[in-house]
Image: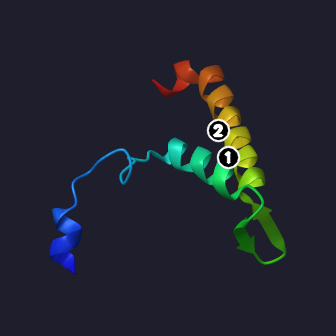
Amino acid sequence: MRQHFEALRKAPANHVPLSPLSFLRRAESLHGARMAVILGDIRRNWSETGHRIRAVANGLDRVFRRHKSCWL
C-alpha cells in the first residue's frame, strides 16, 4: 500500500500545501458550522474559531506596534 502512496505524484488535484492561515480559511469554508473547539462549556465552530483567531492576532499586532520601541 505504501508504494502506491509514494508513487502518486503531487498535483493540484491531490496536493494543496497548507500554511496555518490557508488551513484556517479552508476549514472555515468547508466546515464552517462544524465544531472546532470543545473545552468544558466552551463550544466554537470553525467560523467562530476563525473570527476569534483573527481578533486575537489583530490585538497582538496593535500591542506590538504600540510598544515596538520597547521590544527592539
Task: Give me the residue at 36% from left, 44% from top.
Answer: 12
Q: Which amino acid does label 2 sit on?
A: Ala
- Quadrant including the N terminus: bottom left
Mark 1–mark 2 Cα distance, whole angstroms, equals 6 Å
Does residue 55 sit above or below 40 in this rendering?
above
Instruction: From the viewer's perspective, tell me whether residue 37 is left or right of residue 64.
Output: right
Task: Give me the residue at 36% from left, 51% from top.
Answer: 15
Does residue 28 sit above or below 61 in this rendering?
below
Q: Name the residue under label 2.
A: 57
Task: Give me the residue at 18% from left, 66% from top.
Answer: 6
- Give the image location of residue 37, x and y in percent: 70, 67
- Give the image location of residue 72, x and y in percent: 45, 23
The label number, if any, that marks residue 53 in the structure image: 1
- Give the image location of residue 20, x and y in percent: 49, 47
- Give the image location of residue 64, x and y in percent: 60, 28
* CB-based contact (under 8 Å), mark 1 and mark 2: yes
Judge the density around disc 2: few (<14), some (14-19), many (≥20) Cα neighbours within 10 Å: few
Instruction: From the viewer's perspective, tell me whether residue 27 is left or right of residue 16.
Output: right
Does residue 66 sit above or below 35 in this rendering?
above
